[in-house]
Amino acid sequence: MKINVTGIQMGAVSSKKGNVEKAREMLESLKSLHQHPQFVCFPEMFSYVPDLDDDFDAIDHIAEDTNGPISQMFADYAVKLKAYIITGSYIQRKDGKHYNTSLLFSPDGDLLAQYSKTHLFDTLDFKESSFVDLGDHYTVVDTKYGMIGMIICYDIRFPELLRTLSLKGAEVIFCPAAFPMAEPSPGVDHWEILTKAASLYNMIYLVAVNQIGIKAPFTYFGRSVMVDPWGIEIAKAPNKECIISAELDLGYLREMRKIRSPLQHRRPDIYDF
């Protein structure tokens, strides 16, 4: 089975209203694509990237409930495009707390799943935990095309999570991201290594869609990418806001898992974690 997947690389560097309108315009542009996508994915914090000037104690002003306007917009476009939509992520208001959450909508506009980021990016110059709480579960979803796993950005640095998704059946893992260039780590190099390693170690397709633009204290470099089960990039975004697409061959993935997958040779009886 072959599926067409589209990633929307955009920069959420203006107001929430402006960012959401930009996302709507990019969704509209998908109607003219020659190849109809079965899946569409946005970046992390597509509607608003918090920065150092924000009042994190008052972050509720950009948060939304699960069934708020952002959710409704994506549900409507899932129906219009007849596609599954991974919303990237936004600040979700839930049970008196805030989360960095990604939603998955079906082509019927139904909310199939939600995933809240389980590893928060806390550094000396920026603490994600100052405005959102930790998610507490992993997410794998059975769609009519195959099993889908969901992670968000910093999660990709934690191989235990991706291996869990793979062992639970995920064939494609979507990774909305706001992955920056930030000293002392060489951001672009790490992005390329991590996206390839995640795919290769777990025999999955990885769809990693990144922010692009500058918002203090970080520069987001784009380079959204789709990687096959051998760690080979099959689509990569240039250094600008854009739409990228690739065909993912799930039949090929399933055959390779039968022939060469290291998942068959695991030794959980000796692993101490």
Image (spheres, rainbow, N blue to C red):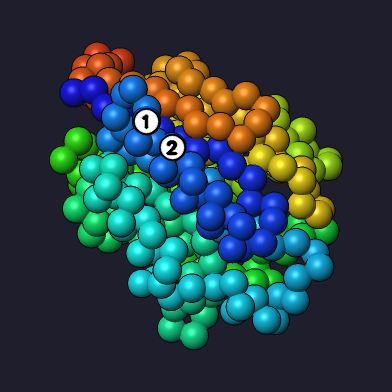
Relative to residue 271, is residue 75 depicted above or below?
A: below
- The quarter of the rendered structure image containing the N terminus is top left
- Element under label 1? helix
Looking at the image, can residue 61 be seen? yes
Image height check: is 110 above or below 207?
below
Which residue reaches farthest bottom? 96
As rendered, which of 254 and 268 lies closer to the eye? 254
Q: Is residue 125 left or right of residue 99?
A: right
Q: How many marks?
A: 2
Instruction: From the image, tell me which residue sits under label 2.
Output: 29
Q: Amino acid at mark 1?
A: Ser
Taking the spot 59% from the left edge, 63% from the top edge, the residue there is: 17
- Please tell me how crowded label 2 is: few (under 14), some (14-19), or many (20+) other residues with Cα within 10 Å: few
Left of 45 or right of it: where is 127? Answer: right
> Which residue occupies 54% across, 23% down?
236
Numbered disc 2: secondary structure = helix
Is residue 116 placed above or below 26 in the rendered structure?
Answer: below
Closer to the camera in the image, 121 or 84? 84
Q: Residue 204 location in percent, x, y?
A: 36, 29
Give the residue at the far left of this rendering: 144
Q: Residue at x 50, y 38 (%)?
A: 8
**Labels 1 & 2 near each other (Cβ < 8 A):** yes
Tell me if 243 is positioned left or right of 186 in this view.
left
Q: Which residue is mark 1?
A: 32
Could you tell me the amino acid type at mark 2? Ser
Q: Position of residue 20 (x, y in %)?
A: 53, 57
Q: Is residue 168 visible?
A: no
Task: Locate residue 270, reporting x and y percent.
Answer: 39, 40
